[in-house]
Image (cartoon, coloured by chain):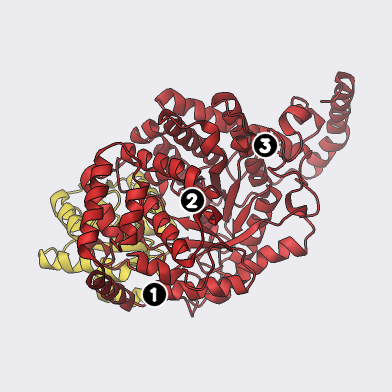
Chain colours: A red, B yellow
C-alpha cells in the first residue's frame, strides 16, 4: 500500500505520459487491436502501475511463503530447498509393458510415478467385460486383479517412490491393491507416499469415468479420508482436479472456481460424516492445468492458493495451517497440442511448464509432442522430461521464491482471478453446492459455453493457433506413433482366467458377501475392499458388488 | 421436402472426452441442423437404435480413446445389418492417419482429425447426404 500522496503523484504523471508520450505514439502507429484479451478472455490493459495494486495489502494478501495466505508458495524456501517432483503420467497396454516404461522413466531422472489406467479399469470393468471391447490397454494400463498390480510395481520399492494414480470411481479398490502390494514387499503402510485422484465430482462434470451415484460416491471418498488418516498417513487421499475442467474448455477463473467449489463439497461431506477438519484436510491435494497465457496462468495458481487458504480458515475454521495449504500437481494443457506440425508442441509445453514453475507447483507432468495423435513414444516422453530438467537446472527461475510477485500486472491479475473464482463459488453455494449445481447442469453449461466460444474465436481468426489457422504447411503424416497391440486384450483375458483358477474361490465369495453387507450398512468399506483384493477378487467383481448395492450414475445430457 | 438435416452426434465406448462432440453439436445446430446428442458411453447397438428411431440423416461418431478401429466399424456393420444404407456415417477424434483408410473401407465416409474447422464439416455434410 502506497501513501495516498505518492499515488496521486503517480496518477498525475500517468496522465501527463498519456497526453505527451502515448498520444503521439498512437497517432503515429495505432495498436494492433482495439482490445487486448487474456487467454481466458479477460481484458488486459496496456499498462499496469502501482495504482492497479493500491488496494492489495501486502502483508494480508501476498505475505510470505510458507505462511498464510500462502500466495507466494506453500513452503518458505520453495525450489531453493527442493525442486518440484517431475512426475510423468504413463501407462499403456499390460502391467508388464508399463512396468518397463516406469523403470525407464526412473532411470532418466523422473522422481515420481504416475499411473494411467485404461478406461475399463477406470470404470470398474474387467478386461473380459463386453463393454471393455476395443478399449483394453488403450489409454492406460489394464488392471484386473492384484496379480496385475504386483507385476506393475515389480522391482519398484514402494517405500522409495511416490506414486500418483489417476483413478476415481474405483479409487478405493486400486488403493487397496497398492497397499496389498506394499505388504508383499514388506513395506508398512505408514511409509507409502502418493496420491489417488479420487475426485468424482469433476468426473460428472468433465471427465466421464463415473460409476456410482453422487451420494455413495461421496461416502466412498469420505471412507478413504478416514481410513488413510489412520492407516496411510502420508497418502494424499484426493487430488481435486481443475485440469479436466479446463481441458473441457473452461476459463482460468472457472477452473479455480469450480475446482474449489468441488473441494468445499468434499470437506463438507467429511465434516458431516463426523471427521474433524484438521485430521483430513492436510492430505487434500489439487491438480491444475497450465495453459498458454503465461502471466494469467501464474496468477491463477497464486489466486487458487490464496483463496483456498481463506476458505479453509474462514469457512471451515481449520486450525492447523497445513489444512489451509493448497498443494498442487500441474499438467500442461493437452487441449493446446496440435496435430499439425507436432514439433511445435515442444515449445508450447515448455512455456506452459514454465508458468507452472513460476506459479509454484509441487509436481509437474509435461505433455509430449505427439499426444494430439496418439499415446507418446519413449523419445517424445524423454524430450518432455528434459524440458522440465532444463527449466530446473538452466533457466535460473528456481533461484528465488515466487519471482513474479510484485509485478503490477501479475498481482492485479491474481486478485482479479480470485474475485472471479469467488463469484462462481458464491453462485454454486446459492444453487445448493457443487453436487447440486452439477445435477442442474450449471457447471457443465458454463464450461461448454466457454469451449464453444473458444472454437468460434479460432475459426474467426480472432485467436491464432500456429500451424492450425495461421502458418500452415503441407506436411506428411507423422510416422512411428505408439500403437497398442489388440492382442493385449487377449492376454488380459488369459490372465484373469489363470487368476480365477488359482485363487480360493470360496474365500473370494465370502469376502465379496462381507463387502456387500458393509456397503448396505454404514461402516467404512475400505477394510472389506482390502480383504477382497487380497484374495484376488477382480476389480470387476468388487465394483460389481458395489454397483448392485449403490446403483449407477445417470448423466444429465445437455448441450 | 426441405426439412432440416437431422444429425446424431454420438459418443461410442467408454471415452469421457465430450468437448469436441458438444462443440460440433452446437456448431451444426447453429448451421440450421437438428441435432441429437447421445451423451457418453453408448454401445454401437444403442447408437444404431437411436439413429433409426430418430430417423437421422447423419451419424457423427466422436472418440478420443483409441478404440475407433473396433467401435466405428461396428456401427457401420450394425447399420448394414439393419438395412440402413441412406445414413451418412462420419467420425472424428484422436485418430492416427494410418488408421483412416481402414475406417473408410469399413464404411465410415469421412474422418475429421483435430484442428478441422466446424465449417468444413458442415460443408461436407451438406454435400454428401445420402438422401
Query: Furthest residue to the top?
Result: A4
Closer to the camera, A218 or A62? Answer: A218
Label 1 resides on the chain identified as A
**Marked residue nearer the N-terminal end (2 or 1):** 2
**Residue B81 showing in the rendered view:** yes
Question: What residue is shown at x 68% (from left), y 42% (from top)?
Answer: A74
Residue at coordinates 89% horizontally, 24% vertically from top-left?
A6
**Disc 1 residue crowd, few under 14, some 14–19, many 20+, Cα 10 Å:** some
Q: Nearer the viewer, residue B110 or A263?
A: A263
Secondary structure beneath disc 1?
Answer: loop
Judging by the rendered image, the residue that carries numbered circle 2 is A247
* Labelled disc at residue A414: 3
Mark 2 falls within which chain?
Answer: A
Q: Which residue is mark 1?
A: A484
Ranked by sequence position, the earlier of labels 3 and 1 is: 3
Q: Position of residue A425 (x, y in %)?
A: 51, 29
Task: Find residue B104 and report its image quarter.
Answer: bottom left
- Give the letter of the chain under mark 3: A
Amino acid at each position: 500500500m502506497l501513501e495516498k500522496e505518492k499515488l496521486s503523484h503517480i496518477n498525475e504523471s500517468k496522465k501527463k505520459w498519456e497526453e505527451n508520450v502515448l498520444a503521439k505514439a498512437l497517432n503515429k502507429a495505432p495498436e494492433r487491436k482495439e482490445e487486448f484479451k487474456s487467454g481466458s478472455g479477460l481484458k488486459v490493459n496496456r499498462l499496469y502501475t502501482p495504482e492497479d495494486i493500491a488496494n492489495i495489502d501486502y502483508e494480508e494478501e501476498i505475505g510470505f511463503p510458507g505462511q498464510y495466505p500462502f500466495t507466494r508458495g506453500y513452503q518458505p524456501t520453495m525450489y531453493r530447498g527442493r525442486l518440484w517432483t517431475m512426475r510423468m503420467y504413463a501407462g499403456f497396454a499390460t502391467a508388464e509393458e508399463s512396468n518397463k516404461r516406469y523403470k525407464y522413466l526412473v532411470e532418466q531422472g523422473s522422481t515420481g510415478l504416475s499411473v494411467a489406467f485404461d478406461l475399463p479399469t477406470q470404470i470398474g470393468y474387467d478386461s473380459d467385460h463386453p463393454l471393455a471391447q476395443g478399449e483394453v490397454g488403450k489409454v492406460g494400463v489394464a488392471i484386473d486383479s492384484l496379480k496385475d498390480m504386483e507385476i506393475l510395481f515389480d522391482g519398484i520399492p514402494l517405500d522409495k517412490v511416490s506414486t500418483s494414480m489417476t483413478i476415481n470411481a474405483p479409487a478405493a479398490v486400486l488403493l487397496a491393491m497398492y497397499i496389498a502390494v506394499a505388504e508383499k514387499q514388506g513395506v508398512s503402510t505408514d511409509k507409502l507416499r502418493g496420491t489417488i485422484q479420487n475426485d468424482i465430482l469433476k468426473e460428472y462434470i468433465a471427465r466421464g469415468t463415473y460409476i456410482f451415484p453422487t451420494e455413495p460416491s461421496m461416502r466412498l471418498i469420505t471412507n478413504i479420508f478416514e481410513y488413510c488418516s489412520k492407516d496411510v498417513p502420508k497418502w494424499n487421499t484426493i487430488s481435486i482436479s481443475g485440469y479436466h475442467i479446463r481441458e473441457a474448455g473452461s476459463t482460468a477463473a472457472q477452473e479455480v472456481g469450480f475446482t474449489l467449489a468441488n473441494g468445499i463439497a468434499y470437506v463438507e461431506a467429511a465434516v458431516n460424516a463426523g471427521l474433524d477438519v484438521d485430521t483430513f484436510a492436510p492430505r487434500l491435494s489439487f491438480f491444475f492445468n497450465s495453459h498458454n497465457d503465461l502471466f494469467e496462468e501464474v496468477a491463477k495458481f497464486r489466486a487458487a492458493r490464496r483463496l483456498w487458504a481463506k476458505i479453509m480458515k474462514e469457512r471451515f475454521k481449520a486450525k492447523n495451517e497445513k489444512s489451509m495449504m493448497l498443494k498442487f500437481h500441474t499438467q500442461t494443457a493437452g487441449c493446446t497440442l496440435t496435430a499439425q506440425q507436432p514439433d511445435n508442441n515442444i515449445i508450447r509445453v515448455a512455456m506452459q511448464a514454465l508458468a507452472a514453475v513460476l506459479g509454484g507447483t509441487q509436481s509437474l507432468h509435461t505433455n509430449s509432442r505427439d499426444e494430439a495423435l496418439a499415446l507418446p513414444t519413449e523419445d517424445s516422453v524423454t524430450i518432455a522430461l528434459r524440458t522440465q530438467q532444463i527449466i530446473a537446472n538452466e533457466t535460473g527461475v528456481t533461484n528465488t521464491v515466487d519471482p513474479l510477485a510484485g509485478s503490477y500486472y501479475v498481482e492485479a491479475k491474481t486478485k482479479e482471478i480470485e474475485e472471479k473464482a469467488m463469484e462462481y463459488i458464491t453462485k454454486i453455494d446459492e444453487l445448493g453446492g457443487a453436487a447440486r449445481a452439477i445435477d442442474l447442469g450449471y457447471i457443465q453449461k458454463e464450461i461448454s459455453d466457454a469451449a464453444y466460444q473458444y472454437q468460434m474465436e479460432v475459426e474467426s481468426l480472432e485467436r491464432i493457433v500456429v500451424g492450425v489457422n495461421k502458418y500452415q504447411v503441407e506436411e506428411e503424416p507423422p510416422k512411428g506413433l505408439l500403437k497398442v497391440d489388440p492382442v493385449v486384450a487377449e492376454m488380459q483375458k488369459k490372465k484373469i482366467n489363470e487368476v480365477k483358477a488359482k485363487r480360493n474361490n470360496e474365500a473370494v465369495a465370502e469376502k465379496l458377501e462381507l463387502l456387500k453387507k458393509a456397503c448396505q450398512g454404514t461402516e467404512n468399506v475400505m477394510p472389506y475392499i482390502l480383504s477382497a483384493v487380497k484374495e484376488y477378487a477382480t476389480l470387476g467383481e468388487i465394483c460389481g458388488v458395489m454397483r448392485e448395492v449403490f446403483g449407477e450414475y445417470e448423466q444429465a445430457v445437455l448441450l | 421436402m426441405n426439412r432440416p438435416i437431422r444429425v446424431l452426434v454420438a459418443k461410442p465406448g467408454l471415452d469421457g472426452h465430450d468437448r469436441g462432440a458438444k462443440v460440433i453439436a452446437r456448431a451444426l445446430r447453429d448451421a440450421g441442423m437438428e441435432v441429437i446428442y447421445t451423451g457418453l458411453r453408448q454401445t454401437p447397438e444403442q447408437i444404431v437404435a437411436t439413429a433409426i428411431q430418430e430417423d437421422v440423416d447423419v451419424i457423427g461418431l466422436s472418440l478420443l480413446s483409441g478404440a475407433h478401429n473396433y467401435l466405428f466399424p461396428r456401427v457401420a456393420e450394425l447399420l448394414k445389418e439393419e438395412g440402413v444404407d441412406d445414413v451418412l456415417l462420419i467420425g472424428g477424434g484422436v485418430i492416427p492417419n494410418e488408421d483412416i483408410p481402414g475406417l473408410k473401407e469399413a464404411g465410415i465416409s469421412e474422418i475429421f482429425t483435430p484442428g478441422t474447422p466446424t465449417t468444413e464439416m458442415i460443408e461436407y455434410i451438406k454435400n454428401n447426404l445420402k438422401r
